[in-house]
Amino acid sequence: MYFMASDRTQTGIEGLDKALNGGIPSGNLVLLSGGAGTGKSTLCLQYCINGCVKFNEKALFISTEQTPTELLRQAAQYNWPLTDLINKGKLKIEYFDVTKGDEFLKRIDESIDHFKPNRIALDSLTTLADALLISDMSEETAFSMVQIAESVNPIPRTEQIITKTLLYRLIGALKKYHVTTLLTSELPEEGKTLSADGVSEFITDGVILLSYLSVGATELRVLKIRKMRYSVHTKEYLTYDFSSKGLECKLEEQLSI
């Protein structure tokens, strides 16, 4: 299925947009999975800033990993005008301290309702899902879910069922706004799933994997679009790296593995 440009949300990263046949189908929720140091947070922040600068859009960046001060330091590495965009009302940063806060779904709803962004990034889904498990579910609800799960499935599956239910709640809350959204997930090295929870890759619309690849004595950063609903896309691995402008990816530099 081919989409017109108006049906796409461009990341603003040229090679990635080409690999996505013009960008992410608008309204899709896309999982960015990768290990430590692969650039998930940077790609999310760049996606938001590109939306503001290149496409005159409003972007919401929800962080559970980095404080606003830390994000400012990260943006300074690439000369991104983070403070200016915030002051102009183009970019909004919401920091959720998962060790102190609660009612995260309500806070996400309020942020989207009030700010009305054209694109959203959530860094990270892994941390937020864990926080939801602790804070947003009442003990009574959690106990009921455990009883149901254990009556139908072996006990080891109980945690996965609760996690899946929480993720459906979170992703459902985001999907209702029809805003193209990036969500990050930690991916353990040598893991057999495409996310930390082993569930979100099935209920999101797309999955992009970021990883390291050893080729002889050289270690390359590579990304692969594993899934993208409503679109054709490149199936090969693409190399990427970081420059003074941020993450750069060239469609011409594909690897057949």
Image (cartoon, rainbow, N blue to C red):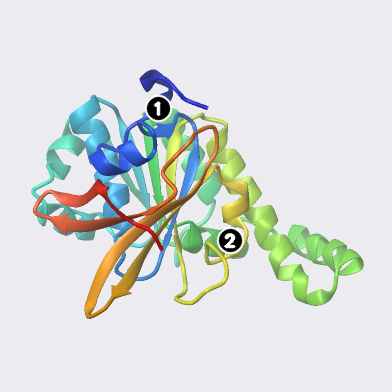
Question: In front here: 238 or 175?
Answer: 238
- Which percent across, then down, holds residue 100? 45, 64
Q: Could you say where residue 13 lies in the image, as x and y percent from the top left?
A: 25, 41
In the displayed structure, 40 sits above or below 57; it is: below
- Which residue is at 34% across, 71% downward? 36
Quick check: 190 left or right of 71?
right
SS at mark 2?
helix
Number of on-image labels? 2
Q: Can you say which quadrant of the picture contains the C terminus?
A: bottom left
> Where is 251 relative to 239, above or below?
above
- Check disc 2 and report the residue beneath it: 135
Is the residue marked by circle 2 packed among few (<14), some (14-19), or many (20+) residues within 10 Å?
A: some
Dot 2 or dot 1: first in sequence order is: 1
* Kind of residue at disc 1: Arg
| Three-letter amino acid code at the position of disc 2 | Ser
Query: Relative to 215, is 248 on the left or the right?
Result: left
157 up-or-down from 11: above or below: below
Q: Is residue 90 visible?
A: no
Quarter of the figure with residue 69? bottom left
Q: List x then y, in percent, for residue 238.
A: 32, 54
Residue at the spot 31% in from the left edge and 65% down from the top edge: 38
- Residue 164 pos. (x, y %): 67, 57
Is 90 in front, or is 107?
A: 90
View extreme (front): residue: 256
Look at mark 1 in the image and give the residue it sits on.
Answer: 8
Q: Residue at x 76, y 69 (%)?
A: 158
Q: CA distance from mark 2 to mark 1?
A: 35 Å
Camera sees residue 210: yes
